Image (cartoon, grey):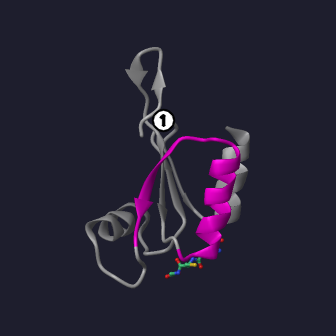
Amino acid sequence: MPAEEAGREVPVIQLYYDPRCPFCQHVLQYLEDNEIPFEPKIISLSADSPTKRELVRLGGKAQVPFLVDPENGVEMYESGDIVAYLERL
Ligand SMILES: N[C@@H](CCC(=O)N[C@@H](CS)C(=O)NCC(=O)O)C(=O)O
């Protein structure tokens, strides 16, 4: 759900992930523990879907997790880099 700030909608972090992926679970756990709002972009790595095609269009490969932070123009793969980025927010 989009976060709201001062009555206006602000872009929210999006996380592309496959629930079966342990690297994704690591990022999801961090988001949950720190109550960071995000838009889930759930894919199955083993099946084609519009969301998976969106991921490939944005990042260039069907790898998860993939984070998009529209507010800061940031897009990244790699669970460790994503958590390190979230720690700096
Ligand atoms: N080093 C990466 C590994 C991510 C990774 O291997 N994800 C798997 C799913 S658990 C994946 O997307 N595999 C498909 C691929 O790499 O093409 C990270 O820490 O995020």
Q: Is residue 58 left or right of residue 37?
A: left
| Residue, far top | 6
State which quarter of the image contains the C terminus.
Answer: top right
Residue 38, given in percent of the width and then of the height, sits at: 50, 45
Residue depicted at 69% across the width and 53% down the height: 30
Count of labels shown?
1
Q: Is residue 28 part of the magenta span, yes or no?
A: yes
Tell me where the magenta segment starts and ends, as one range.
20-43
Residue 56 at x, y percent in the picture: 37, 69
Residue 48 falls in image quadrant: bottom left
> Depth check: 34 or 74 in front?
34
Can you say whether 67 is above or below 89 in the image? below
Residue 74 shown left or right of residue 60 in the figure = right
- Residue 37 belongs to the span the image colors magenta: yes
Judge whether 18 appears above or below 72 on screen: below
Q: Which residue is labeled 1 in the image? A: 71
Q: Residue at the spot x=59%, y=67% of the render? A: 24
